[in-house]
Image (spheres, rainbow, N blue to C red):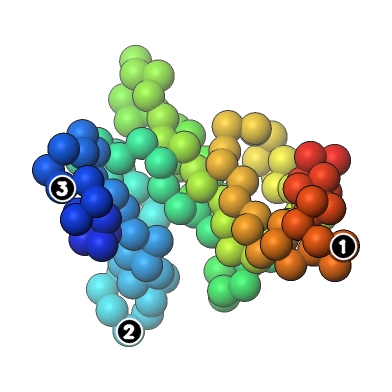
Amino acid sequence: MLAWRAYPICGDTADLPFTAIATVGVCCRAIHYWVIEFAAYQKIWRLAGVDHLHVNGLQNKFWEPDDSVVASIQSCLTPLWPDAAHCAMPVIASGQWGGRAPETFRRTQTLDVMYVAGGGIMAHPDGPAAGVNAIRQA
């Protein structure tokens, strides 16, 4: 599934397809729809040329258990072929803030992630600048 809302902006000039975060829930985690394990799902998208994928986050605002999130991160960082170094960048999001970053690193042992913490920055009690500092300090 492509995020068709981006099409008017990029048209047919984009080199890679845009993935939609919603596809992860529908394809991999929604029990009332068809279900595919994330390890297989991410391979399909990577073969299509996608270089980063949303993997949720630890203690996320949805229902996904932390072990599942860690497995998703590891599957993105695993090369598709033994002799290929290409991996996909896991995008960690969903209720993230500076206080969750240390546990994320402890569980994954990698900094090769995008740590998206919009709410953790913008909703910080001391304002967005303090939210940015909290992420940096973590």
Tell me which residue sits at (66%, 64%) in the image.
119
Query: Dot 2 corresponds to which residue?
Result: 32
Observer-nearest of 17 and 111: 17
Q: Give the CA distance from mark 3 to mark 1.
A: 40 Å
Give residue 88's quadrant in the image: top left
Sooner in the amino-acid sequence: mark 2 or mark 3: 3
Mark 1 vs mark 2, foreground winner is 1
- Badge 1 marks a residue whose secondary structure is loop
Residue 67 in sight from this viewpoint: no
79 with respect to 60 (left or right): left
Q: Residue 11: image x %, image y %?
A: 15, 47
Query: Dot 1 corresponds to which residue?
Result: 126
Give residue 138's quadrant in the image: top right
Tell me which residue sits at (37%, 24%) in the image.
86
Query: Dot 3 corresponds to which residue?
Result: 11
- Disc 1 marks which amino acid? Asp
Observer-nearest of 136 and 38: 136
Tell me which residue sits at (72%, 41%) in the image.
105
82, above or below 95, in the image:
above
- Badge 3 marks a residue whose secondary structure is helix
